[in-house]
Image (tube, rainbow, N blue to C red):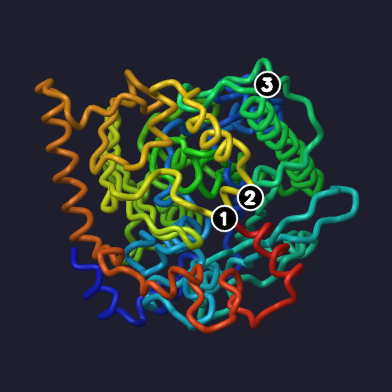
Amino acid sequence: MNYRALALSLPGLFGTVLAAPPALAAGSARPNILWLVAEDFGPHLGSYGTPQVWTPNLDRLAAEGVRYTRAFTTAPVCSASRSAFMTGMYQTTIGAHNHRSHRDDGYRVPEGSRSPPTGSARRGYYTANIRTFPDAVQVAGTGKTDWNFTDSGKPFDSDDWSDLGPHQPFFAQVNFKETHRKFTSPERADPAKVAIAPYYPDHPVTRADYARYLDAASELDEKVGRILARLDAEGLAGSTIVVFSSDHGEAHVRGKQFCYDEGLHIPLIIRWPKSDPAPEPFRAGTVDDRLIAAIDLLPTLLDVAAAMPKPAAMQGEIFLGDHAGPPRRYVFGARDRCDETVFRFRTVRDGRYRYIRNFMPERPFLQANDYKERSYPVWNLIKELAAQGKLTPVQAVLAAPRMPPEELYDVVEDPDEIRNLADSSDPEHRAALERLRAELGRWIEESNDQGRTPEPAAVAAAKGATRPGSDPNTGASPAPKKARRKVQDDRD
């Protein structure tokens, strides 16, 4: 499908699709939607088998709903990923692929790709991005959107939990910061007992850092538990679909900003309300191993909850209910500029292999990045140990002066993705390489990947700012030095 032509030819797409049909007139019983979104977090819950993390509330949610084991975002960094899953479109198609881009230039995505809360509200849904909770809940949402475009409408009706009960059905999101660096949660995990991936040095710095990440997950779970208890206390649990996911993979060196499973694999749990018949093939208390892309959530929720037909331009696929398509064979991902650091990775994964194409192999994995150098102690540790010759061969790959142009991993036999099979002579590996290389090339062309045209060098050097002195995170005019640093620390 030619998405460029389609988007430009359908300027009124959502306005047409969102006109409420007679069957869904105001007052009809439709489930509420509560979407809980963690930041920089992989599938590291007790229910996913992670040791040294305490997540009884999310584990209970998984037991009462469906836990998805192979859900992936389309980008390994927050702004690009959120721009994608909140529109149901690949960030590379809608020009939102560079991290923290378009904050000061008024860029708008094609009308058919506008953010969903505006559209869902026009179907009778009250929309909210919750910041404020009753004092007894002791939780504050971040209200994060972080979209790489300017929204043309009012995306949310409220940011206050107390508005939800009187305004049903609602489509509400709560965004959490706990698993985003800097980690500040109470210490509980034992660094000596955490599981460290073989590509990281087994060092006290690594263990302490990973333990603090898991502590953040434990605190996140406590806050989710308070919100779910409040939902139940207000009599809303029985009529509310609850979704828990993350904006991309874990906040570690080879996770965030990179296209391995570590950077794209997320937890996904959905609990269906007892008052509403669950769509096929949903079965409470089960595990679903299908490939799911984060951009599939929006069209699925709006179809099964609001009976909203999926717009023709929307690239996400419905995976529940009568309109669900066949299971995905592939999920795709992309990484472009992050802060001042320019890479271009594209990846495709099926149930057995992940293929990564690096369009800038001459650049090292540890290419300078101010955010990672400030916030990731293991990033600097790897450089120090490399200089001392103290890394294993697997770990030394991260400190190499170049990266391979192609990577292929058997994610079943090699879940850590440390044995690159791109040069393997095994016929099965060669066939997988050729097949996935072709699939990725097809996706780049058919989805109209905007990353084929590089950002101007001056914009990249300014971390996405297009006007002299503007803040690349917010688009605002220059702020005092201390304020600028705090904004960056909170938002990267």
Q: Going by the picture, which residue comes out furthest to the top?
A: 193
Question: Eyeballing the image, is 323 above or below 385?
Answer: below
* Mark closer to the chain start, 3 or 2: 3
Residue 22: x %, y % from top left: 46, 71
Q: Residue furthest right?
A: 136
Q: Residues within 10 Å of mark 3 (few under 14, many from 20)?
A: many
SS assignment at label 1: helix
With 172 as the anchor, is 417 left or right in this view?
Answer: left
Task: Look at 36% across and 71% down and name the residue there.
Answer: 455
Q: Which one is in front, 359 or 39? A: 359
- Please tell me which of labels 3 and 1 falls first in the chain: 3
Q: Which mark is residue 433?
A: none
**Which residue is tagged 1?**
370
Residue at image mark 2: 374
Question: How many angstroms separate mark 1 from mark 2 (CA)?
Answer: 6 Å
Q: Is residue 471 left or right of residue 130?
A: left
**Amino acid type at image mark 3:** Gln
Residue 74 vertical placement versus 27 (above, below): above
Residue drawn at the location 25% of the way across and 64% of the way down: 452
Judge depth for marks 3 and 1 and give the one in front: 1
Q: Amino acid at mark 2?
A: Arg
Residue 308: horizontal and vertical position, in percent?
42, 62
At x 63% / y 50%, what residue is drawn? 374
Which quarter of the rendered picture does the N terminus lie within? bottom left
Q: Are marks 3 and 2 in contact (CB under 8 Å)?
A: no
* Residue marked by disc 3: 52
Name the one closer to the observer, 272 or 85.
85
